[in-house]
Amino acid sequence: MNARRYILALDQGTTSSRAMVIDRAGAVQSLAQRSFPQIYPQPGWVEHDPMDLWSTQAGSAAEALAGAGIGSSEIAAIGITNQRETTLVWDRRTGDPVYNAIVWQDRRTSEFCDQLRAEGHADLIQQRSGLLPDAYFSGSKIRWILDRVPDAKQRAERGELAFGTVDAWLVWKLTDGARHVCDVTNASRTMLFNIHTQQWDEELLAILGVPRSMLPEVVPSSGVCATATGAFAGVPIAGMAGDQQAALFGQMCTAPGMVKCTFGTGSFMLLNTGATPMPSRNRLLTTIAWRIGDQTTYALEGSMLMAGAVVQWLRDELQLIRTSAEVESLAASVPDSGGVVLVPAFSGLGAPHWDQYARGALLGMTRGTNKGHVARAALEGIALQAVDVLDAMHADSGLALTELRVDGGAAANNLLMQLQADLLGVPVVRPQNSEATVLGAAYLAGLAVGFWSSIEAVSQQWQAERVFTPAMSVDTRDRMRSQWRRALERAAGWEQP
């Protein structure tokens, strides 16, 4: 065991696959990252080539080991974290995908989800799965593949097809098809999993028309679930969690009442609610945070579908900036947004609104509006979404927020983090190691194989890098929040079903 001095953490994200080699101190020894194409067949549709997900992940893993100057014999375990809800279906015999991966952002199944609500299934779906009927989740995406891909439904009913979230796909590839598993956190994002019994739910499967034979075995987030073959032969796969749950663990939000927000492509806030699932009255999601051994921790989650993607839009489509990092200086070139509000509902609105027909809106412009105002309104829109979610969390849980821990690429933006603290009215804390998602996957894997002795030992590695304290007047905050609510009303329901 002494020779195995590192954990290999794989982070399969929405726009790139990353791999990191992490030592016992939680320090990143090597990092490799490979991007892959986004596929947009129609407006509102988003796909990935499943082989791109695998090839970029395998390539970045090999590159990370080479960068650290080590071989697989020095890896104690592999931890996996992944973009959630993204749906893959493949042939069990050949391993060939029957269709592209349908990405979590994809909205093609919105009308089917409307139908589920119209048929009166919403309450049962929420009671069993903790989720609301929405195109975001995997279940309706599986149904679309079964209905639209020739012979897929018949093949699935014969047991020939496998469904997986991205963690299941990676384990399948890492084990050359020997293991078909996903962890409880990813299972809890499908609309097919009962978060109370922690089993696939036969009634939900019937409602969505998904054959039980397609589904993976569900395993704990921390625990040896497979052994890799090929380039990583003999290395245990010992930790798996969807990216937001991994970030909650990596931020060491291990006590009830602790909250983190990850500012990635989307923005995702999770509140640790402890050992009991907490139903939401305010359109949040009840989800599994992790399971370690037989101990399950639950969370309330607010998913905001656009965060860093808003900055990418400013860069790529509007070409207001050349690099994402430039948005901070552009937004800081003006003292405020000049009354401009940007509602980033490009893929609809997530929590707590759940309006899949909302669309992005840029409001309040005058002849004096410049690109600095638009950039600042974009950052404010990202932060104001999080305010709505935190208000809902407080109403559901009764827990008062004392601080918000932040991570993700956009958390490096100091102006955005200051705006977030100002608009929330509580400190925003950024950790020294901003790779919370990857660290969470590494910690879950390392705990399973004794690489780290306990959660308490791991928690000592977490340290704050910077604390952003609120500096905005209450009057200004109230005015901005009132303006935001008016803008939301105008963006709501824009697209006709």
Image (cartoon, grey):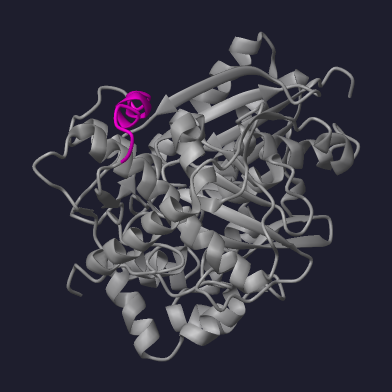
> Along the line of sight, which residue is nearer the eye, 480 or 211?
480
- Percent x, y of residue 39: 26, 43
Residue at x 53%, y 68% (from the top left corner): 284
Say if 125 sits above or below 199 in the image: below
> Along the line of sight, which residue is nearer the eye, 296 or 318?
318
The segment highlighted magenta reads 324-336
In the rendered structure, the answer to whether residue 28 lies left or right of residue 207 reads right
The answer to which quarter of the image holds residue 301 is bottom right
- Percent x, y of residue 359: 24, 60
Residue at x 20%, y 75% (from the top left corner): 497
> Along the line of sight, which residue is nearer the eye, 486 or 342?
486
Magenta run includes residue 409 = no
- Percent x, y of residue 286: 61, 69
The answer to which quarter of the image holds residue 145 is bottom left
Let me know if residue 114 appears in the view. Answer: yes
Magenta run includes residue 334 = yes
- Percent x, y of residue 332: 35, 29
> Along the line of sight, which residue is nearer the eye, 254 or 464?
464
